[in-house]
Structures are given as structure tokens and as C-alpha cells.
Image (cartoon, grey):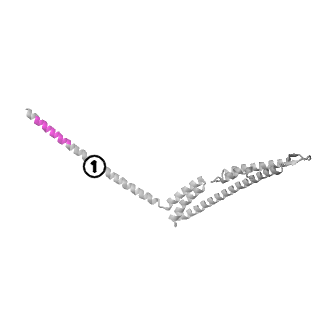
Amino acid sequence: MRRITIAVLLVLVVGLSGGCDHKTEEMLAVATKERDEAKSALAKAEAQIEKLQAENLQLKQTPRFFFDQAVSEEKTADTANTSNADRAAISKFQDVVTRFPDDPLAQAATENIAKLNKRISQRDLAIQKAQGEVLRLVKTCHDATATVQRISDNDMLMADRFNRLAINTNALLESSRYEKAAERAKEKAQALLQGVPDPNGALSQKVDSCDSREEQ
């Protein structure tokens, strides 16, 4: 009886072992199928991405794409209102002209280049005019200060009827008038200089020292 029981148990163990192997094979097959399907889906997605990238690249090679980029740069330049920003926009429009010389947008790009160059020239002229005005005011300040110095050296004292030295009232009033003229010119130059490019500080130095009597 004991031998029969052992035999039955062996049969059951072998049967269960065979069932587990079969189940494992089924799971492995399912996993393999899912993996292959995932690989296929990934390959399709990559192919679609490559296609879209190629289409996007093709769109970026059109005159309209380059022209729109230039227009965007021009709007940025309008806001910045600097010559460097204008030159950046000119470079973009020039790219359109260079790449697509026969396209109608090349003509529009050329017109925008001319407009931006004109704006740069006008800005340069305005800067030169403002710098010139600063220099004119510096000269006024300098000359008025020199006059004050001359009056102080030569005309401030005079002899009265008793041959005694006394303050020349007229000279004193004249000196005061020139001092005020120098002060006004310097203040105007300082205010104007706030909006005038002065890369090396030369103008600022001229303005600051225009009423210095040590230089007269």
C-alpha cells in the first residue's frame, strides 16, 4: 500500500511539473509577442518622426520661412531702437536676398534693408548732432569761465579818487554774469549727455572740467 501511495505522488509531481512548464512557455510566448509589437510600434514612430523632421526641414528652406524670421528680427529691432539690433535684422533680410535672389520676397527684403540702413544713418546723424551740441555748450562754458578768470586777474580791482584800491563793481557784476552763463552751459551739457553715446568718456571729461579755472 505504501508503494502505491509513493507511486501516485510521483505521478502527481511529474504532472504538476509538466503543467508549470507549459504555463511558462505560454507566458514567454505572450511576452515575446508584446516585445515584438512594441518594437514594431517604436519603429513606426521613429519613421514618422523622421518623416516629420524631413518635412519641417523642407519647410525651413522656403523663402517665406527666412523672410518671416527676418520680419520677426525687425520687430525686435523696432523695440530695441539700436543700430546693433537694426544690423541684426538687416543680416536676416540679406540672407533672404542671398538664398533666393529671384523670389519676389527678395525684393521686399531689399526694401526693408534700405529702410533699416536709413534708420541707422538717421540715428548716427542725430547722435553726431547731439554730440556737437554738447561740445558747443562745453565751449560756451569754457569761454565764459576764461572771461571770469580774465576779469578776476585784470579788472576786479580799481583805484578810487584817493588812489586807494577798491572793488570794481561793474567788473564784479560782469564776472557774476559770466559765471552764471558757464553754469547754465555746463548743466545743459550734462543733461544732454545723458542721451548721447560716450564710449570712452571723453565728452563727460570735457563737460566736467569746462568750468575749471586751473585749465584756463
- The residue under the point 11% across, 35% down is 6
Q: Camera-side residue: 80 or 111?
A: 80
Q: Position of residue 142 (x, y in %)?
A: 74, 53
* Spot occupied by residue 97 in the image (x, y as percentages of width and height): 53, 64
In this view, the residue in front, 151 or 98, is: 151
Report whether 148 appears left or right of 57. Answer: right
Q: Quadrant of residue 84?
A: bottom right
Asked if residue 8 is among those painted magenta in the image, a careful observer would answer yes
Magenta residue check for 60: no
Relative to 102, residue 81 above or below? above
Q: Disc 1 marks which amino acid?
A: Lys
Dot 1 corresponds to which residue? Answer: 33
Query: Quarter of the image containing the N terminus?
Result: top left
- As rendered, which of 73 and 214 lies closer to the eye? 214
Please report the bounds of the magenta region as a residue range.
6-20
Chief SS of the magenta region: helix
